Image (cartoon, rainbow, N blue to C red):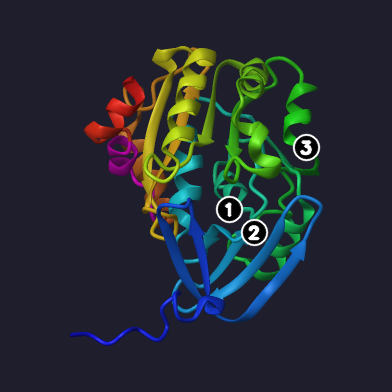
Amino acid sequence: MTTPDTASPQLNPEEWVTDSNGRVALSIRFQGESLFKEESPFQTVEVFNTHDRGKMLTIDRMVMCTEADEAAYHEMIVHVPMLTHPSVKDVLVIGAGDGGTIRELVLHEEIEKITMVEIDEAVVRASKLFLPTISSALEHPKLNLLIDDGIKYLQNAADESYDLIIIDSSDPVGPSEGLFSKTFYQDVYRALRPGGVVTIQSESPIFHQQTFVELNKCLKEVFGQDYVHCYLVFIPMYPTGMWSLTYCSKQGVHPVKNFDYNKAAQFTEAHQLRYYNADIHQAAFALPTHIKKMLEA
């Protein structure tokens, strides 16, 4: 018979961040008080020092990233489209306040301009102060950082103005809720150049199953079934560990059939990436049977 763990979230809830959907939860233990806490007009932004995952950014106590695991998410949301699309010059990023997506984008020298629209200045400020390895490119000369509403920005965006759009959002609550609507993705489609690509944070197939399925259906209605491709990334600090991203093109290239394996392998080696590699790029699109059935229902 084992004795109870005195550090369990049940016995010491003040030492843990618990991300729950009411049925399943992930708890991460942190040290001391929060390093940063601010209630912005939109949400509560916090940074914690964890016991073994480095510093952690949360929004309304939902885990956004930890220093130990963030590379998986940021490398996969960026390098999958960048190493598929033949020529990306202009990029629009919605969200991404921690800066990890921008850090990965600037590794691609062919990009001429990155526009980032983040609604909450507090997220950017917290990341610059306490997550310097993630936010390191937020002052990059190719970046135009706007503190603004990404939904309204896209409504006013010119037609066919971007080669790549990245939707790096939090879960569909609060200011991110509108980023999961058909109207929003119609604006995304309009703002993409012919052949352009969007990659989207599309939730966990297990933790947020209904949102995952509904968003995939919405994207197929906007982009066409043959141009929407779900792929998976494994992040221990996200509930269930399995998360999805989705690649959609405006009648553009397929992310696996048009993939240059050797180019991706050389890029991975040159930049010493932590998660992404040419094999992972291909394998990520191979979905487990139960997830394929979710998307086919």
> Disc 3 or disc 2, which is closer to the eye?
3
Measured as percent of width and height from the top left, residue 88 is found at 57, 29
Q: Give the residues in magenta.
A: 275-284
> What is the secondary structure assignment of the residue under circle 2?
loop
Q: What numbered label is drawn on residue 149? A: 3
Neighbourhood count class around disc 1 (C-alpha, 10 Å): few under 14, some 14–19, many 20 upward: many
Measured as percent of width and height from the top left, residue 169 is found at 60, 42
Disc with the residue nearer the chain's start (2 vs 1):
1
Residue 85 in view in this figure: no
Q: Residue at x 76, y 22 (%)?
A: 155
Q: How many numbered callouts?
A: 3
Going by the image, does 174 lie left or right of 72?
right
Neighbourhood count class around disc 3 (C-alpha, 10 Å): few under 14, some 14–19, many 20 upward: some
Disc with the residue nearer the chain's start (3 vs 2):
2
Q: Are marks 2 and 1 in contact (CB under 8 Å)?
A: yes
Q: Amino acid at mark 3?
A: Asp
Q: Residue at x 70, y 54 (%)?
A: 138
Residue 245 in view in this figure: yes
Q: Is residue 269 above or below residue 197?
A: below
Measured as percent of width and height from the top left, residue 94 is found at 66, 38
Measured as percent of width and height from the top left, residue 182 is found at 60, 20
Q: Are marks 1 and 3 in contact (CB under 8 Å)?
A: no
Q: Main secondary structure of the magenta part?
A: helix
> Disc 1 or disc 3, which is closer to the eye?
3
User: What residue is pinned by disc 2?
Assistant: 135
Q: What numbered label is drawn on residue 100? A: 1
Going by the image, does 161 lie left or right of 238?
right
Q: Residue at x 76, y 18 (%)?
A: 158
Q: CA distance from mark 2 to mark 1?
A: 6 Å
Tell me where residue 5 sits by quadrant: bottom left
Q: Amino acid at mark 1?
A: Gly
